[in-house]
Amino acid sequence: KQEVTQIPAALSVPEGENLVLNCSFTDSAIYNLQWFRQDPGKGLTSLLLIQSSQREQTSGRLNASLDKSSGRSTLYIAASQPGDSATYLCAVSARASGSRLTFGEGTQLTVNP
Amino acid sequence: KAGVTQTPRYLIKTRGQQVTLSCSPISGHRSVSWYQQTPGQGLQFLFEYFSETQRNKGNFPGRFSGRQFSNSRSEMNVSTLELGDSALYLCASKAGEYYEQYFGPGTRLTVT
């Protein structure tokens, strides 16, 4: 059974700091890994999708890496802003389970002005 | 292009009642998945529909069911509601196997 863990559970940083969020998964037989952000009481916003054959993806100030063999992904946020405050979730899609995403518990990020 | 839409956004029901939630995927997306989000269990997969067929199902009791119509719109139904069914129900759609999933804003269900 696939299990996804995110560390840390919560993170508070001053504005402008670069930060790294971690995600690990137990079964390396994945289709892809997706990072989302969720604002309180809202749905999920897709940030980045990394296919199993890829090593990293970038979008603006965000960079996500994937090391399938070790079961790890990191989300790097450069020059953090208060608007980045949200819960960040990673989710993996396993080969055998189609579109089913297995989520981590999330990292709650607070960026202080 | 319009995003994933879900209706209603909020619902309050009483134990024992049933409820139907609706999801309209992004135009052209044929895969629709449903998730339940609670503070204690996090995000859990309910089921996925593709071309009107249930393709995958999570570990939820038979009280949770769904269907998909020919226009890819999907509904999920929960019968005999329990207090523990209170949650944010999220719907997601995607264009194909290797594509990212896009989520709707969710339906907040409260069971009293």
Image (tube, helix red, strand yellow):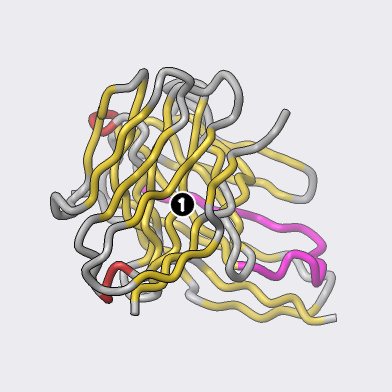
Look at the picture and state if A43 lies above or below B40: above
Callout 1: 10 Å neighbours few (<14), some, many (20+)? many
The image position of residue B49, as x and y in percent, is 33, 29
Residue drawn at point x = 33 percent, y = 39 percent: A100
Look at the picture and state if B63 lies above or below A42: above
Look at the picture and state if A106 lies above or below A98: below
Numbered marks: total: 1
Q: Chain of mark 1?
A: B
> Tag 1, which secondary structure?
strand
Give the side of residue B86 with respect to residue B103, left or right.
left
Residue drawn at point x = 22 percent, y = 56 percent: B79
The image position of residue A50, as x and y in percent, is 53, 35
- As for residue B38 lying within the magenta part, the answer is no
- Between residue B49 and residue A12, name the one nearer to us: B49
Which amino acid type is shown beneath numbered disc 1?
Leu
- Between residue A18 and residue B99, name the one nearer to us: B99
Give the side of residue B11 with respect to residue A60, left or right.
left
Q: Furthest-left residue in view?
A: B62
Q: Which residue is mark 1?
A: B90
Residue drawn at point x = 35 percent, y = 73 percent: B111
- Between residue A22 and residue B49, name the one nearer to us: B49
The image position of residue A51, as x and y in percent, is 48, 30
Residue drawn at point x = 48 percent, y = 50 percent: A73
Give the side of residue B8 with respect to residue A68, left or right.
right
- Between residue B43 and residue A29, name the one nearer to us: B43
The image position of residue A41, as x and y in percent, is 58, 68
Q: Which residues are magenta?
A: A71-86
Q: Quadrant of the C terminus of chain A?
A: bottom right
